[in-house]
Amino acid sequence: MRKQLNAGVIGLGILGRQHTEFLHRHPAVRVAAVADVRKPVAEEVAALTGAAAFDDYAAMLRAHTLDLVVVATPDHLHAAPALAALSAGVPNLLLEKPLATTLADADAIFDAVERSGARLFVDFANRASPLDIATRYVIQQGLLGRVVYGEARLDDNITVPTQMWGERTREFAGNSSTAHFLLSHVVDLLRWYFAPAEVTEVYAISQQLVLGYTPDLYDAFLTFDNATKVRAKAEWIKHIDELVEFYLCFSGSEGTLIYNKRNGFGCDEGWRANVRAQLSLDELRRHQDALLVRGANVASLLHRPTPTTGQLSAGGGQTALALEKRGPSHGGTMALVGPCIDAIIEGTDEPSSYQGNGPLPNHVDGLRQTQIVTAIIDSARTGEPVALG
């Protein structure tokens, strides 16, 4: 039997604890050490896993030879522990998103990974959600025709930047923003959905009238090199019952995809791809089977939509094809960690547990995401479009 991977976790906040618990349960991993600047917290988490506790990650890296280090510090504090782990010769890193909140930090991490030959994964967990996998599949397979426009809205309850991290909330939120905290998710998903297309231009606005210590929102338009345009908006000043609202929609030349990922008031969670009419029923069922293999259990539909509102009708009534999932289908915050461990063990970028979904997000993806988010921030600051090379 292969020896277990010795793992260490740096940063034991909300997600750091979840990483530690997940790794502790994984049969191929042994949590050897954990580190947090709050020594009592480190000792508490260590006691649950049998790990050694440190309040200094540098001391942890000196004391233990680790196969994997997870960096789950606040958004703006990723660079120092990541660089220290790479300098210590750790061969595998998993960083919580975003890779960094400044281009300087992102470049430093990228360069260190390239020099060391280590592998770095970024935990863009949405890439493991079944319906996000289905979204990518539908777009990649051309089932909507040519996608020309999309929108993504990812909003948080105002309690996130005002309460989520207790007494440290104002500091953490003030050193991040909805661009880093929320749009990092959206930007990575869009790049993954539309690969190999890349963002070439960004235009954005921002507002800072409510919170004061961090922007209330960013609202951006992204142009891809295949001419697709997507509006990507995120705010965290909503007084809503839910913690998160997440909605995506993509319009193609022959179909439309609507995805209520996290439901808001009066909305049901679900996913619908109205696909191109030229598909045969056998082809539709083959796509349904292909999605089931990827973990997305969606229905295939043959129906006759009749668009009406009150006394108005747009005609219709023609036979239409769709793929659909009603209800939630979330991958969870740790959904991508298992495939990352499998990738380490198998020595590949696309492990057997993630086949068909493309390579796992690495330092290249992390750098590109940071470049795009930084461009969003710069465009909102200057009021001008920002071009990306």
Image: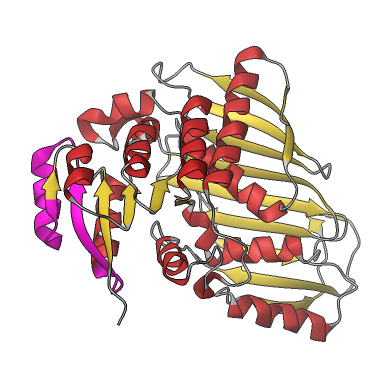
The verdict on residue 151 being magenta is: no
Residue 45 in sight: yes
Which region is colored magenta? 25-52
Does 284 appear above or below 187? below
**Toward which corner of the image does residue 137 lie, by quadrant?**
bottom right
Image quarter of residue 322: bottom right
Counting every numbered tag in the picture gives: 0
Q: Looking at the picture, how far across and down is residue 132, in whole percent?
A: 59, 60
Q: Nearer the viewer, residue 25 or 209?
A: 25
**Closer-to-camera residue (4/161):** 4
Q: By what rule are the colours in the image chosen?
A: secondary structure
Q: Nearer the viewer, residue 246 or 127?
A: 127
78 left or right of 52 in image: right
Q: Is the residue 156 above or below the residue 332 in the image?
A: above
Image quadrant in which the C terminus is located? top right
For the N terminus, the quadrant is bottom left
Q: Position of residue 113 (x, y in %)?
A: 48, 43
- In the image, taking residue 42 as reference, residue 12 lies left or right, namely right
- On screen, residue 99 versus residue 147, left or right, reads left
Residue 45 colored magenta?
A: yes
Q: Is residue 77 above or below residue 36?
A: above
> Which quadrant holds residue 210?
top left
Where residue 123 appears, x then y in whole percent? 45, 52
**Position in image of residue 94 (x %, y %):** 40, 51
Residue visible at 42% across and 35% down?
Answer: 239
The reply to whether residue 242 is in sight is no
Give the residue drawn at x 40%, y 45%. Answer: 243
Single out the residue that lies furthest toward the top. Answer: 382
Residue at 66% across / 61% down in the picture? 135
